[in-house]
Amino acid sequence: MKITLKDGSIKEYEKSKAIIDIAYEISEGLARVATAAQVDGKVVDLRTVLSQDCELDILTANDEKGLGALRHTTSHVLAEAVKRLYPEAKLAIGPSIDTGFYYDFESEPFSREDLDAIEAEMKKIIKEGAKIQRFELPRKEAIAYMEEKGEPYKVELIQDLPEDAVISFYSQGDFVDLCAGPHLMSAKPIKAFKLISSSGAYWRGNEKNKMLARIYGTAFSKKEELKAYMEHMEEVKKRDHNKLGREMELFATVDVIGQGLPLLMPKGAMIIQTLQRWIEDEEERRGYMRTKTPLMAKKELYVISDHWEHYKEGMFVLGDEEKDDEVFALRPMTCPFQYYVYKQSQKSYRDLPCRYGETSPLFRNEDSGEMHGLTRVRQFTIAEGHLVVTPEQIDEEFRGCVDLAKYCLTTLGLEKDVTYQLSLSDPEHMDKYLGTRETWNEVEDMMRVILDHIGIQYKEVKGEAAFYGPKLDVQAKNVYGKEDTMITVQLDMFLAERFDMTFVDKDGEKKRPYIIHRTSLGCYERTLAWLIEKYAGLFPTWLCPEQVRVLPISEKYHEYANQVAEELKDHNIKCTVDERGEKIGYKIRETRLDKVPYMLVVGAKEAEEHTVSVRSRYLGDEGSKKLDGFIAELCKEIKTKEIRKIEVEE
RNA sequence: GCUGAAAUAGCUCAGUUGGUAGAGCACUUCACUCGUAAUGAAGGGGUCGCCGGUUCAAAUCCGGCUUUCAGCUCCA
């Protein structure tokens, strides 16, 4: 058999051979740091015996997948330590994840002290250095074996494996775990690990199941890497919008107002106002018509839209269905409201596409544990819109929505931080959706054709569709790596029928339009959260709630400072004057801490010569270039002499 | 909603066996009128998240609630 290595060299063997032995043949050094291997692109265990021609890539902890094997083995060490200290604990599952690994146990919850003790035990286990061995058992024996060991979760896992599945186990010393692998040859290469936190997690991710105790940890092959990771996490915390946004007085929450109901403070409100003015103007330029529709409606509206059936739990209902003649609900979306705008007159194919936009507060009754900062709230404002289109217009209009979304992302400097997701229905739970499987297949295929036509890279995810249609979701991650939807463009083939929306086509026949639901920059609060984290609070100039601060050297120059400020304000620059009786060094320090991009220092010299002394941080982002240039020009105008511009490293 | 942790001055936090509440920053006042990251001095400010219980006595112990955080589940 011929084995092609990653560097292109070829090894030939007469008989079959284990990968670990090949690694030793290449070099002992490699064999010692090897964690797993990739055979024809598939990640496998080092124990795998090769018996036919293949491409072989031996992985170490420096490879993402190799690191995964190291972390997976660390999770087994964790499980062994837990079983030693808490013999009554039952094992569930323990995979590696992006940031490390976790293991779920049926056990009393673990405290930080417990984690420290478990960590110490893990160190002991690694030091003992037992060899890790793999063995397989036939299904029946595997079940009997795990029953004997008293591991009901493992038994359930085996029972759910397909009939023909290979059931493999890994052992290290006395500890045995059901596992598909791959694993290291021993726990020795685990040089640096840490148990991060513990929490609850439902068995198999289902809230109806028992809650297990989960331990999160991370592992690296080098101590320095672990240290760097821990330091990185500390840095990341400083960017966390929920901390920084409060510190910067962009938003706040108040106990008696309630969960998920943040107050946008003057600075935060100013940023959102800037975003709103910008996006509304842009939408108008792109042919959108603005609507302003009620924030609540009678229950009957939601019955027609089927939100009452599919979304009632998520709505704030006003009134009692049993007692009151009329029951209202705050709106969780604007769809049906804009549909009735459409329905106010008979539409011709000449009227389509009909593009409606609305800056709309929405209300969603999220579960109490879900709220988080500005990213998950009960009342939020969305750049909402609906396009009513003929079947022929779908492709072009959908493309227009994606184009607008991309324009928003680029202007905000977020275009490289997002991924695209095609959110599809779940064929096994069709009760969650309107319509039939056939229609869904049709529309989902239509989405794929449109997206391929537009040419964007996307990932398909089942079970994430809206109840009325598939979605293209623009996903972004926060500083901790948690992903949320930022922008969404959805195709809807059901609600037009529910609301009996029609247009008269060329042939004089009444026809059913399609509807595109879309957001341009999504939810303002959530977008603000991403901007805070993206720029660590140092916003592009055009978004800054305060763009220029004039700093008079002393009280004598207040009049001149105000003159300068008035001149800037005349040009719509957001400008203030620091009139406090503080020294200039102190004012500069505070202005920098307030993250104001431009400071204009004025004193005797400037007042006399009618100049300003500029100090700025220049960000050079696309959205601000014009404004930065404009401010610089204005400063020049104010001055009669050359600008002294001090650029400061942030 | 579930599991766990937390809540002390505007902010960051001290306050261990239950005995009359503390620091730094911020704020106010006064002096200094100042040239590119912190001038000095004095002062004010807390029913220790809320409600109830135990106790002669509760920031401290117990219970309930509210809010926040880490996850799970759910979602823009």
Image: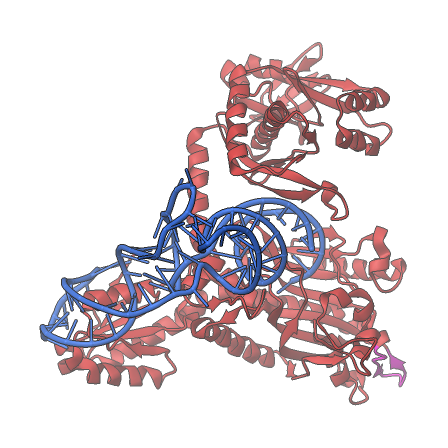
Classify A565 as above or below B18. Answer: below
Q: Quadrant of residue A404?
A: bottom right
> Where residue A40 sits: x, y (%)?
68, 29
- Give the position of the N terminus of chain A as an image quadrant: top right
Q: Quadrant of residue A599?
A: bottom left
Near-viewer residue (A192 or A603): A192
Residue at the extreme bottom of the image, as rendered? A345
Classify A357 as above or below A258. Answer: below
Q: Which chain is red?
A: A
Shade representing chain B: blue
Residue A454 in the figure: left or right of residue A597:
right
Asked if one can make out residue A27 in the rendered structure from this viewpoint, the answer is no
Q: How many marks?
A: 0
Asked if one can make out residue A523 in the rendered structure from this viewpoint, the answer is yes
Q: For the stretch drawn in magenta, what is the main secondary structure? A: loop
Q: Quadrant of residue A572?
A: bottom left
Q: Is residue A567 within the magenta segment?
A: no
Near-viewer residue (A637 or A142): A142
> Where residue A482 sits: x, y (%)?
58, 51
> Where residue A227 sits: x, y (%)?
42, 35
Q: Residue at x 49, y 72 (%)?
A: A264
The segment highlighted magenta reads A499-511
- Give the position of the C terminus of chain A as an image quadrant: bottom left
Q: Residue at x 82, y 88 (%)?
A: A346
> Where residue A644 sits: x, y (%)?
20, 69
Classify B74 as above or below A160. Answer: below
Classify A505 as above or below A438. Answer: below
Residue A423 in the figure: left or right of residue A432:
left
